[in-house]
Image (tube, grey):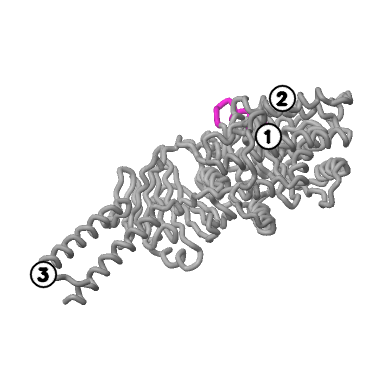
Amino acid sequence: MRRALQILCWLFAAMFFFQETWALELEDNDYKLIDQSEGIAAGSISGDDHNFWQKAGQKQAELEHQWDFFESKDVNEIFDHVVCRLWKQVHSDLPPPAVKIIKDPLPNAFVYPNGACFVTTGLLTCIFNEDQLAMILAHEMVHYVQKHALGVNGHFTTPHISNEGFGAGKDSGKGKGLSEARIDTYRLEAEYKADIQGLNMMLSAGYCISEAISLLDYFIRLGSGAGFEQMMAVSLISYEKRKENLINMLEKQSESKTCNDMSQSGELFRKAIAPVLLSNARSALRRGLYPLADKNGLEYLSLRPLDPNGHFVLGEVRRLSASQGSINDALIFYKNAIDLNRQFAPAYKALGIVYMKSGQKKLAKTYFETYLSLEPHDNDCEFIKGYISLCGN
Amino acid sequence: MKFSDGFHLRCFILAFAGLALLFLGCSRQVQSASQILKTPNWSVNVPPNWMRLSKPDNTNATILSFDGACLQYIFIQDRRISQAFLYTRHVLRDGMLPHEIADVIVEDLRSDPHIKHFNPISIEPAMIANQPGFKMIYTYYDQQDVKFKTLYYGALVSGRFFNLRYAATLRHYFEKDLNTFERLFGSLHLK
């Protein structure tokens, strides 16, 4: 009897334990695939540098698998030229950074401890000349050469430094635990150094450093613009403070260099990065960022008016934003694209969609059939065949 | 354990049973799903022994699972067309064609920072309880680097976006309950 009671008690206990555990698993948000991961620099607390480099390398490899990279020989040449010119000012045994461009409409740039540097198409479309590109790359190079990420990794042992004077941005150390506050303080300091030393690098390389201030002005305007306020990657130091720091630095410069008129070199630069504008317009379209897609698409069209892709992107912006006036404009852009290239299949599909939705089924069927004749194996072909059958005879 | 007399033994058993029942009752988010799951807008026949987990938020979603949501689940959602997506600025509209809706869903999934290596395998037209929609199959890795496969059905229905998906770890669980999901899908009734 006693043995049976003991078994019963254990059964009750087991039932309680496993039920609670399973309930805990179900309460866990894993089924929604949540659990934001900490960044490598902020999350790593080990003093083991080798482990840190390995983790950074793993994270970078993961990144490279997940993201779409923008490739263009002409744009790569611009980057190579700027990197080379800046790197000559660096006295280090490290290899020069390798820069890759990510197709992402949000402006951002970052560097990994091993020198792999990433810039988004969103950021490139904000840059108007080679000097501004040099500012971005010089900033990241300083992080790389000074090993700031490694510094954050080992920073738990350093004394607390006040972050006043660095103009902390939204994500300052306020309200956080002491360790996080120390990391934030170190990161603020690192950002400040990257700005200042990056400017020195630009100056030594013969770039116009007042262009850095123009770029920050642009970010400030962009961040406050309608539809763009969430576009900007958070800067640890506010753009206004960074601009103030740079102006102070410029005033202290014993040598002042007047910049040559930037307008012509700016025009050439924008022409050279025109493919980035089209790529970013497409990326913005995919995310539903219609104002940005329109902005980039219009500029691309002004630079390359005979490319049907530019007309098509602008047609898509108008069609997907879907007011009646914009649908009529979309039709014009699609037809422009077809006038420039009779084989431009996406425009036929888009016209078919517009006419089908407006009830002009015969016209829709014609365009859909033309589309299928040009792209018989497209991903959407089964859908299009279904729409054709709905259009009747 | 030793008890000096029967009275203490009975007290112990009663106390233990009471505690066990109390804690069992605390797992209120996990319920045995009744055989027919009905809402104002849809109903399905729930497979035997599948549990229901309802999230107390505004997703209008019902989640069913047999082995635990970390291994497999069926997700049924009925959302307003105007409801914004989390990771893109797209908005669904009345009159959108099935492939356009699929494009919006794909972009939202692709932009989801919690999903890694999102890979759409196929997207094709499908009827969802006599409503024209789409069927999509995709794989991805979760934050623990476990590979999942999902079968996703979606359609616009009377000003709402209805979607029904079956997700499970690619290894073992996806194939194990695929037929079960197909039976549930076959029982779907949209109002």
What is the quadrant of the N terminus of chain B in the image? bottom left
Residue A234 makes an appearance in the image: yes
Marks counted in the figure total 3
Q: Which residue is mark 3?
A: B6
Q: Which residue is mark 2?
A: A244
Residue A212, given in percent of the width and then of the height, sits at: 77, 29
Q: Closer to the camera: disc 2 or disc 3?
A: 3
Majority secondary structure in the magenta region: helix
Disc nearer the start of the sequence (1/2): 2
Residue A36, given in percent of the width and then of the height, sits at: 53, 48
- Neighbour class for label 1 at 10 Å: few (<14), some, many (≥20)? some
Read off the magenta span. Answer: A322-334
Q: Amino acid at mark 3?
A: Gly
> What mark, if any, has residue A335 been given in the picture?
1
Residue A357, given in percent of the width and then of the height, sits at: 52, 36
- Neighbour class for label 2 at 10 Å: few (<14), some, many (≥20)? some
Q: Is residue A69 above or below residue B175?
A: above
**Hey, which quadrant is residue A178 in on the image?**
top right
Chain ID, mark 3: B
Does the stretch in magenta take in A127? no
Q: Amino acid at mark 1?
A: Lys
Tag 2, which secondary structure?
helix
Q: Is residue A255 left or right of residue A237?
A: right
